[in-house]
Every structure is written in structure tokens, then in C-alpha cells.
Image: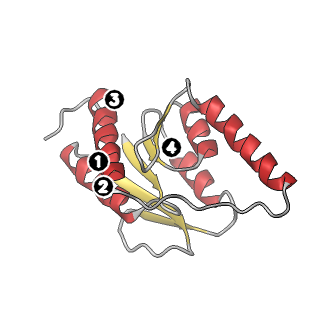
Amino acid sequence: MIIWVDADACPRRALAITREIATRYDLDVWTVSSYRHEFSHERHITVDASPQATDLAILKRLTRGDVVITQDYGLASLVLARGGHALSPIGKRYTDDNIDRMLLERDLAARARRSRKTFRVKGPAPRTGADDRRFASQLELLLATTHPREAN
């Protein structure tokens, strides 16, 4: 099992939490990002800046049972279809039961934005300590239920 991080939009704190928990499970963490994001780590893959390059690099290497940390619903959907597990950096678990609804909501929101020429999109809320705790808890739960070894 490998943990893949879509590092183009992953908060640094979520990445640190991922590495900390993965160490207890003796799992490798790989980050993948476009060259526009600076990472200096031995387990990092840099891709070009094309729109889906990071997603494709992760999917190309993904094996059944791997975990992907991503905010991208489309990537999460493909990960689930390939037998992987997907989790957002704020601890939202993507599942077969919720991914279709999430993709539909994303599509409806995009259509609403396109229909209004002056529509202003707000960015995400600032990351909080509660986000960190929820993410750590959900990643720990995911690994405890899917990883064959116990945490150290």
C-alpha cells in the first residue's frame, strides 16, 4: 500500500499529518505535483502543468488498495473505480455511496457559475485545527481498517 498525495492543492499541514501517520504504519508517501509547486523530497514526482497531468501520473502508478489524498472529486472517482481509497485533506472520505452526488453537485455549481457573468467564487475557508484533527482521525481510521499491519 502506498499513500499518494495530489500535492498541487494539498495544504502543507495535511501533508505533514499524512507523513506522520504513514510512518507509524510503515507506509511510503509519494507526492505528485506540477512543476509550478516546489517540493524537495525524495518521494516526489514532478509533472508538467497541463490540467490533468497530476491526476494521470497518480492513476498510472495506483494499485488496488492504495490511498490517495486529493480535493479533486474527479480523481477520487477514478481512484475508487480502480479499487483505491480516497480522502480529502479535511478528512472527507470519498466512497461509492457519496461520489456520484459530489460529482453532480460540482457539475451543477459549474453550470451556475457559467450562467452568471458576474458570479464571484469564494475560495476555501482558512484551514483550522478542527480540519487537521478530522483529517488525522479519518486517515488513521482508513489505514487501521485497510492496512494489513497494525500501527507501530
Q: CA distance from mark 1 to mark 3?
A: 20 Å
User: From this viewpoint, which residue is outermost toward the top?
Assistant: 97
Callout 3 amino acid: Thr
The image quadrant where one finds the N terminus is top left
Q: CA distance from mark 4 to mark 3?
A: 16 Å
- Marks 2 and 1: in contact by CB < 8 Å? yes
Q: CA distance from mark 4 to mark 2?
A: 30 Å
Q: Count the labels in the image.
A: 4
101 horizontally vs 147: left or right: right
Residue 131: where, in percent of width, then height? 36, 50
Q: Which of the labelled discs sits on residue 133, or is there none?
A: 1
Per the image, label 4 sits on a secondary structure element best described as: loop
Residue 13: where, in percent of width, then height? 34, 61
Q: Earlier in the sequence, mark 3 or mark 2?
A: 2
Residue at the (29%, 33%) spot, across then down? 141
Q: Label 4 belongs to which residue?
A: 62
